[in-house]
Every structure is written in C-alpha cells, then in structure tokens.
C-alpha cells in the first residue's frame, strides 16, 4: 500500500511539471481568445473562456462551492447576517475562487495545485490544514507563536498518513470531481480493502454503519464557542489582545479549542462520522454591550459531520467510543468540567445535544448509544481479544 | 505601567504612609486623646479589639502636630527594604508567628528559587532565599542561605523579575486583582482588586496601594489567597471553579473582556468547582497556620512544609483518621480557635495532621469527624472512606486520593520564554530596572484528561508540565545565544512535569475505564493506538516523534520516557507498570465496579484461561 501511494504521489508531481511545459508550447491565441474586459482567459467572470477550449467542462467549478461559497453564505444568512447585514462582505470574502489561476500556478507557469496552494484557503479551522498536521492555535496573542504559513500559525500535530507519503489533495480530489460539484473523486474503499484480520473490521456493525474515518481520524480541530466581536471604534480592540484578522471591524475569538479525537454523530449517509462545531456562534457588539445592550448572543449551535484529514492506521481504544458518552454529546453531569451556564453561554454543555443540531446529519440518539455501550457478549469477546493481542506485544521493560 | 509607576520612587513613602495611617487611627482612639494621628485620620477603622495604640504598631511621633514630623520614624511595613518593620510592628507581640514566618516558604521563596535553579541551570551548591536571613533546616540545624540578589544567572533573574512579585516579603501594587501588602499584612489586611483604600478615613480614601479597610482580618478569606495563588499551579482558581484557559477574552462582560478578569490581562471562565468549595469551605479550613506560616523550620519545598493530607479527615484505605485529646489549656488548637464560633476546649478530640499535630478546627465527636469553617462557623461532616471496597482496590494503595478524585488539572504545554538583554526588566528584589527582560508565549492549555506519574512519596499522582521551558536568549549585540533551548535536568536535556494536586476535587471519582483504557492518563498524551505502538497526536515542535502533552511513547511494545518528573524519587510509570495498568482492561468489561471482590487482591490475569472463564467466554 505504501508503495502504491508513493507511486501516486510521484505521478502527481510528474504531471504538474508536465502541464507547465505543455502550455509553453502553445500559441498565445490558444488561450487568449478574447480581448477587452474578458482578456484574462482564466477568470471566473469570463468562465475561463481561454482555458475551456481544451479543459472542456472545467468551468463548471464556477457553479460550485469553492466559487459560490453557498454553504458559508447560507450559514451567515441564518446567523451573523441577522445582527449585521454586512457581515459577509466584512469577514468572508477573502477566500473564493475567482479564476483558474487561483489554484493553477501563474500565467508563466500553469501547474497542478500543490497541497500548499490548496491550503491558501483551506487553512485554520477548515479541512485541509489538518492534512499536513496543523491545528489552529488560540486567538490570543500569547498563543500566536511559532512558524506561520499563509499568515496562519498552527499547533504541530500528527500529519495524515497520506500526506506523509507524499500524496497531494488532488489525488483524491480530482479536477473532474470538483467541476462536477462532488467533494472527492475517490473514497477510502476505492483504494483500501479492509483487512479482516483486524478485529474491528470483523465486526459487521462497524463495517456497515461507520465511515472508515470515524475510527481512522486520529484527531480533529474543534472550536467550541466561536465569537465575533464587533468594534465600531477600533481603538477598543487593544483591550482584547487578540490576533488581528482581515476585518477592520471585527475580532474573532473562541471559548475553547481542542484537537483530540473528534465527537461522533450521524452523517447524511446515515453513517457514524466525526462531527465538529461549525459553528456555535456568538456575537457581541462592543459598543452596544457597553451601553447595557445585549452581548454574547448565541446565534447558532450547529455541528457538521465531516472528514478530518488526519488519517492514521490506528485508532482510539474501544472505550474511546463505547465507554465515552461525551463523544456523542451525551455527557453525564458528573463528568462536566466547563460550567457554561455560569458564563451565560446559553447552553448547558457543549457536549450535550440539547439546544444544538447537526446541520448535515444528526446526533446519535441516547437509546442507540446505550445499546452500543451495553457490552454484549460479542463485544466482550472482541474486546478481550483486542487487549490480549495488544498486551502480549507490550514489553515489561522500559527505557528512560 | 501602573506597577512601574508604583514602584518608582513613591513606593517607600506611600507604603509607610498607608500603613501608618491605617493602623494609627484605630489605635489612637484608645487613650491617646491628644494624638495627632486620630486628628488627621478621622474615621479610620479600628483595627481590632485587641490592637490598641497606633504607635505600638506603626511607630511615629503622635504628639507632633505637623504631618512630616508626626510621620518621622514610622515603620516601613509595606516596603521590602524595611524588614525592620516586622520586628518593631508585629513581632513585639507576635514573636511566635514572626519567628515562624522568617523560615516560611511563602516569605523566603526558597522552594521556588531552588526549583527554578534545578530546571534551568542546576544547583550551585548554595541555598538562596529572598533576603538571606539565617534559618534552621528541617533537622533543626542552623544555616545561612544567600540572598537571591546574589544568584547571578538566568535562574536568579527569572525569580527576581517574574516570580518575586508574589511573595510575602514584598508588596505588590497596581496589579489588578493581585495587589497585596508585604509582611503580615499581606494576608491579614483586606486588599481589594484595585488595591485602593475604601474606608471612612477621608485622608486616605481612594488612595491606591493600601488595604481596602483598616479592619484586620485575623482569618484570611479565599480572596486573600487568590491574590497570589492564581498563577503557576493556579490552585486558588481551580478550587473556586475558575480557569484562565486560553485568554480568549470571551464571553464579554458589559462589552469588556470577560467574563472575569484577573492580573496579567487574563480572563477567567467557570469550571466545576472543588467539592469542598461548593460546600462552603475556604482555603484556611483545610490549611493550618503551620502550612501557611511555617513551623519554624526551613523546608526545601512547599510539599514538605505542608502538613495536611486528604487522609487526615477522610482516612486512608487501611487507617481511620487519628485524633488527640486537648488536655492543656494552652494547647495550640485551643489557642488558635479562640475566635472561632465554636472554640476548641479541653477534652475535645482533635484530628491530627499527617505530621501528628492537631487541627484547630477538625474534631471527632460521637463517631463522626466534624470540620468547622474557621470563618463561617459552619460544621461540615467528613466522610471516612477507610475499608470501603472501592477504596481497597489492590494496587490502588499506591494512588494519591486526588488521582481519582480530581475532575480537572490545569496543564500549560510549551512555555516559550525569551530573555532579552537589550531591554531592561524590573528586578522586584533589587527594586530597580536592570538589563534583561523576560517575555513568554505558550502553545496550549488544557484541563482533562491529565497524566499520572510517581511523586516524591512514591505514590501515583497527577502531574502537570513543570515546566516545558524553551528558552531564547537575546544578547546585547542582538545575537541569539540560545534559541528555543531545552535546559538540562538531571544531566540531560529534557522537559519536565511536576507532581500536582490541582485543588479541583470531585466527589465522584474517575471511572475505572476512564483511566485504565485511556493511555493519556499514563502520560502518552492525546493519541491513537496502532498495533503495539501508541502514537501521540499533539507533537513537540523540536521532535517529530515526541508528544508535547505527554512524557511516554510506546513503539513496537517498548515504553520509553523522554521527560523528567521533578522532585526526589519521582518518575514516570515503567513499562511493566504501564502494561499492568492496561492489563486491567481484560477484567473491566465484566467486572466493571470497583466494589467487585476480584479487586480486593491482586488481579490474576491468567484467570481468563481457567475453565470458568473459558466457558463464559465461549458462550453465545
């Protein structure tokens, strides 16, 4: 498998340099077919008229998520736009596809996008940043340290096993699939056949009801309580010492960030999948709040089922799911650490389903969790076998 | 800026003035009709019933009319340079407490200084304290430590410019929520968040750098302790259910950073509070005066000075709490409890601390152990756990109570410290700005889960980074002589964890599986299990294969530790111990209650192969 991945990676790199050379051999008119305002052959405004002569159909990318940002737009409409109709323009316009060259190199060197190119937009809390082993840092300047890539600092995390073997985003997210409006061109099972020797793979329920990445996502960035603070007087920002963002009027912060094994829910395929807050969104207009107006307004408490790009061969232990109600947002009060009520957060706990929803799926029902954590004889047998094998291979001695 | 202003110049005078004024007033009201103290400081609160004369505490010349002359000779109680104030002001009456205080770690800071040395440049064969006064060690032998001003290296600089701000020997002003007096007044006079006098003496009202009132607080409340114990271990915060997590400054409070602000522009959010706090107990309800003010001997570390333990009131698995009857009128417990709602009297059976001394507020009566709130007078019943099945799990005698009974343990990962010699920093001991300024950035902070390791008692205890310092030194010419350098500890470049009781106690213990099946509790950090390897997912910047939030790795079945646990005899769990801990998972799916009889004796892991288990496990 490792050799296969290396081969794919090498193939991708080869293609990339090849495409640059190919374009150099073309006559100018091959691409620059229009003049005037539409002279940029790769611009979305002209539906990449200069490119689609050869790359037929690829202009459909302009109809889909990366260009239209429809998902983000509808989110803003049902959240922050209710308190600031200009929120989208002020905070969300820096990342969208405006033409082929956003991703495909420069006019002097057309290229397939590298991972780093995708991460110009897919950074911070957005999937793709995690692929290289990066999790967002806290927003206070005390935590804004270390190397920054594309202006974004990060916590160093275990990178995705596919990234480590040199595979780029395009390996699974082909141009054709994106143009068609799909999220990917390949799924796990297109390349991987689950090994039945692995105990977990022998459990039918696992194979039928779980996404592969429910277990194999080693970690996931989670932001609990996303705050957008609106400053009509920018001088007031100084008191907050938060990372300056692109918006003159806003600062962003969070109540809590984590990057361990992500909570689980049910996705649109009715499979168990990692989920994350996106977003448990709060808003404070500083000036209004200082005049005794409302603050910390909870606009949405939404989660999304998603695929953290943090794949590893291993997984958490059985108890990581089967004895971990908080992971399904069924946290018992006796395990509660954060006291949100006292902080006026409008939720009892981030790890309670009450008052929250999964926008593209659902939370796991309590009855189902109870069945799952009930420890049937089959579970016990498999569990014991798992631990026995593991323990037999752990040495008694250790090194210091 | 506030601090700097306060410290520059006016400190000595201000402090003298404040204290003199405050204490004068109360005292002067008794038999000093012609005193100029009361004439100027009209309305100043009477300090206490037992403290009379202004001059006996403050010195000065009360018969002089002019302010300058009247203030001549005032004792400089709040000024670190005026140590003499102690002897003249409080010690003339409180000699016993004063002599103890001189060796008290909160005053000498010997433990902090030594720990910094150990984890930065190593010990140099000398002992250091804040002021270098003669002391008696734990064995009673006299010794003369050096003043920390003479510790001329990074350790000394760090202590003097960072840590020295909070110790009883120095006043701190101008720091929101953390200002306090020096000396006895640090704990026995109530400072508010702004360190401003708010009493009824109009000459002093609104002035910063003074206690909020002149009424003495013989029994300090939690806020007094919180003024200092809100950093490093942050125990005063965790105890009250507060957390200075990520400095996110949210949720806001009236449009300001919030919800609760403390020193260093840190915001606090709420977490589940310690069960003792929730019951209304304050710091001094558990901590004896000897814990806080010392017992006259100089200890190397606070854990050696502290005499209390959970077992004192709750019993251990094997032994019930011990008590000793008061048989003398001058018994320390009787004397200390004179101002409590229920004073202790002859014949009362006083519960003993782990050092075999009596608590002044915990007693045994009719089969029950009672703890009296020293300030509240409220009686709390203490549950004794001795011989209960869940507390007699074989092997768990090696655990500290708070390994299972902590809900949250603050952990600060990656402390990146820069020492810039191109900038001046305030030396709180020397009282001056000298070349070299410290600044810090950080990687990540969390509360749960928390790692466990062996502490100085050979017990398994929570540990927290202590510290994961990465030091960068900028020389006068701008060159970096050290960049993200990891200092040597025990002769080896390594990061450190320290045994730690977070003071966030929960009544409900961690579940068996919560701990045994989650290798994060063993020190592997957040992780995944892959074959017979445990891979960390949050990685140290300086190494691709070491977790930042742990100190153990397991590769191909081999456990390796790469960080030290500070303190004598402390260490991470060994490979055999890790294996044994994880092996309990072979029993837990069926035997999931700690009360289960199989846990009364050492678990026989081969039992799974006996006929009974084979039959049970081969069934449908």
Image: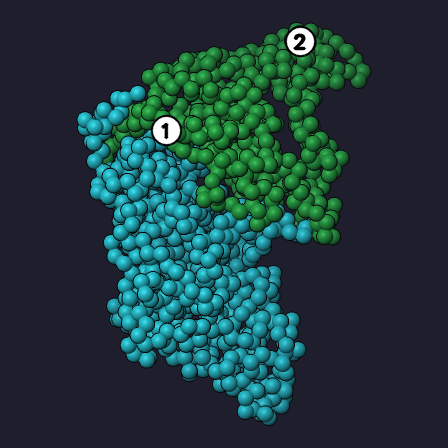
Q: Which label sits in the foreground, 2 or 1?
A: 1
First in residue order: circle 2 vs circle 1:
2
Specify few, some or many for label 2: CA neighbours under 10 Å numbering under 14, 14-19, or 20 or more: few
Q: Identify the image quadrant of the C terminus of chain B.
A: top left
Q: In the picture, which chain is green?
A: A
Query: Which corner quadrant of the image does residue B343 belong to?
Result: bottom left
Q: Residue A103 at x, y = what percent?
A: 62, 20
Total number of numbered discs in the rendering: 2
User: Badge 2 is on which residue?
Assistant: A57
> Circle 1 marks a residue in which chain?
A
Give the CA distance from mark 2 to mark 1: 52 Å
Query: B382 left or right of A286?
Result: left
Tell me the cyan chain.
B
Residue in the foreground of this view, choosing between A15 and A131: A131
Q: Where is B378 relative to A51, above or below?
A: below
Q: Residue at x 70, y 36 (%)?
A: A80
Question: Dot 2 falls on which chain?
Answer: A
């Amino acid at each position: 498998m490792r050799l296969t991945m290396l081969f794919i990676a090498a193939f991708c790199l080869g293609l990339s340099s090849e495409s640059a050379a190919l374009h150099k051999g073309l006559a100018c008119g091959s691409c620059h077919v229009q003049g005037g305002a539409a002279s940029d052959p790769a611009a979305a405004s002209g539906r990449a008229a200069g490119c689609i002569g050869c790359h037929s159909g690829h202009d459909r990318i302009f109809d889909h998520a990366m260009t239209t940002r429809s998902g983000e737009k509808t989110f803003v409409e049902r959240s922050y736009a209710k308190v600031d109709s200009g929120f989208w323009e002020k905070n969300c316009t820096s990342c969208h596809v405006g033409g082929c060259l956003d991703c495909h190199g420069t006019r002097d060197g057309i290229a397939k996008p590298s991972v780093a190119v995708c991460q110009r937009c897919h950074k911070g809390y957005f999937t793709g940043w995690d692929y290289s082993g990066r999790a967002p840092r806290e927003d206070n300047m005390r935590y804004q340290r270390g190397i920054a890539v594309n202006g974004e600092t990060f916590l160093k995390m275990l990178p995705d096993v596919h990234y480590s073997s040199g595979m780029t985003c395009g390996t699974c997210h082909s141009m054709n699939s994106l143009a068609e409006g799909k999220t990917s061109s390949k799924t796990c099972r297109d390349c991987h056949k689950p090994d039945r020797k692995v105990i977990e793979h022998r459990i039918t329920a696992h194979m039928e009801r779980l996404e592969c990445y429910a277990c194999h996502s080693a970690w996931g960035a989670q932001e609990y309580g996303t705050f957008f603070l609106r400053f009509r007087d920018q001088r007031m920002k100084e008191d907050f010492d938060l990372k300056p963002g692109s918006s003159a009027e806003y600062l962003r912060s969070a109540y809590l960030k984590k990057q361990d094994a992500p909570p689980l829910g049910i996705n649109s395929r009715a499979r168990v999948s990692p989920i994350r807050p996106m977003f448990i969104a709060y808003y404070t207009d500083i000036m209004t709040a200082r005049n005794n107006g409302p603050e910390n307004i909870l606009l949405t408490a939404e989660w999304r089922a998603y695929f953290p790009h943090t794949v590893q061969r291993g997984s958490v232990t059985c108890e990581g799911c089967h004895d971990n109600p908080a992971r399904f947002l069924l946290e018992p009060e006796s395990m509660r650490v954060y006291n949100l009520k006292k902080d006026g957060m409008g939720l009892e706990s981030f790890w309670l389903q009450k008052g929250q929803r999964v926008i593209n799926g659902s939370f796991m029902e309590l009855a189902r969790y109870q069945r799952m954590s009930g420890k049937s004889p089959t579970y016990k047998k498999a569990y014991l076998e798992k631990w026995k094998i593991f323990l037999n291979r752990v040495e008694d001695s250790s090194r210091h | 800026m506030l601090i700097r202003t306060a410290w520059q110049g006016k400190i000595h005078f201000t402090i003298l003035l404040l204290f003199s004024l405050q204490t004068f007033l109360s005292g002067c009201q008794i038999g000093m009709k012609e005193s100029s103290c009361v004439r100027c400081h009209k309305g100043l609160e009477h300090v206490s019933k037992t403290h009379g004369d202004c001059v006996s505490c403050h010195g000065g010349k009360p018969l002089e009319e002019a302010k300058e002359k009247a203030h001549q000779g005032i004792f400089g109680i709040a000024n670190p340079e005026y140590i003499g104030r102690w002897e003249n002001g409080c010690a003339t009456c409180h000699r016993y407490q004063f002599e103890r205080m001189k060796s008290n770690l909160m005053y000498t800071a010997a433990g902090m200084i030594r720990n910094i040395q150990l984890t930065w440049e190593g010990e140099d064969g000398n002992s250091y304290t804040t002021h270098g006064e003669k002391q008696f060690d734990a064995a009673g032998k006299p010794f003369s430590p050096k003043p920390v001003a003479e510790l001329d290296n990074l350790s000394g600089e760090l202590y003097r410019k960072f840590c020295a701000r909070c110790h009883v020997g120095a006043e701190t002003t101008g720091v929101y929520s953390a200002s306090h007096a020096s000396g006895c007044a640090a704990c026995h006079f109530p400072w508010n968040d702004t360190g401003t006098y708010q009493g009824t003496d109009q000459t002093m009202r609104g002035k910063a750098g003074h206690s909020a009132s002149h009424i003495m607080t013989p029994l300090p409340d939690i806020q007094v302790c919180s003024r200092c114990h809100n950093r490093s271990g942050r125990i005063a915060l965790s105890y009250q259910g507060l957390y200075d997590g990520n400095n996110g400054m949210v949720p806001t409070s009236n449009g300001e950073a919030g919800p609760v602000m403390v020193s260093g522009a840190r915001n606090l959010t709420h977490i589940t509070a310690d069960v003792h706090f929730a019951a209304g107990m304050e710091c001094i309800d558990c901590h004896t005066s000897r814990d806080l003010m010392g017992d006259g001997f100089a200890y190397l570390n606070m854990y050696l000075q502290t005499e209390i333990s959970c077992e004192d009131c709750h019993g251990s698995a094997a032994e019930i709490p011990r008590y000793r009857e008061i048989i003398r009128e001058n018994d320390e417990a009787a004397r200390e409890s004179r101002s409590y709602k229920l004073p202790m009297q002859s014949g009362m059976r006083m519960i003993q601390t782990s050092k075999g001394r009596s608590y002044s507020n915990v007693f045994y009566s009719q089969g029950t152990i009672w703890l009296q709130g020293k300030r509240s007078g409220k009686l709390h019943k203490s549950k004794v756990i001795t011989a209960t099945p869940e507390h007699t799990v074989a092997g768990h005698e090696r655990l500290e109570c708070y390994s299972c009974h902590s809900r949250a343990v603050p952990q600060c990962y990656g402390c990146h410290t820069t020492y810039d010699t191109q900038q001046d920093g305030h030396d709180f001991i020397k009282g001056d700005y000298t070349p070299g300024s410290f600044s810090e950035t950080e990687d990540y902070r969390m509360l749960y889960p928390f790692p466990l390791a062996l502490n100085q008692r050979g017990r398994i205890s929570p540990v927290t980074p202590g510290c994961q310092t990465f030091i960068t030194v900028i020389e006068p010419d701008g060159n970096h002589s050290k960049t993200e350098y990891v200092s040597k500890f025990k002769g080896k470049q390594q990061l450190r964890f320290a045994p730690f009781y977070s003071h966030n106690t929960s009544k409900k213990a961690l579940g068996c599986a919560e701990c045994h099946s989650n290798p994060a509790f063993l020190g592997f950090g957040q992780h995944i299990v892959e074959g017979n390897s445990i891979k960390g997912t949050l990685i140290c910047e300086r190494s691709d294969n070491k977790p930042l939030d742990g100190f153990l790795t397991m590769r191909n079945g081999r456990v390796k530790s790469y960080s030290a646990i500070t303190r004598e005899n402390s260490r991470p769990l060994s490979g055999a111990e890790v294996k044994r801990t994880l092996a309990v998972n072979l029993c837990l799916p069926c035997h999931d209650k700690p009360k289960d009889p199989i846990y009364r004796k050492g678990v026989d892991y081969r039992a799974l192969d006996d006929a009974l288990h084979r039959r049970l496990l081969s069934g449908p």
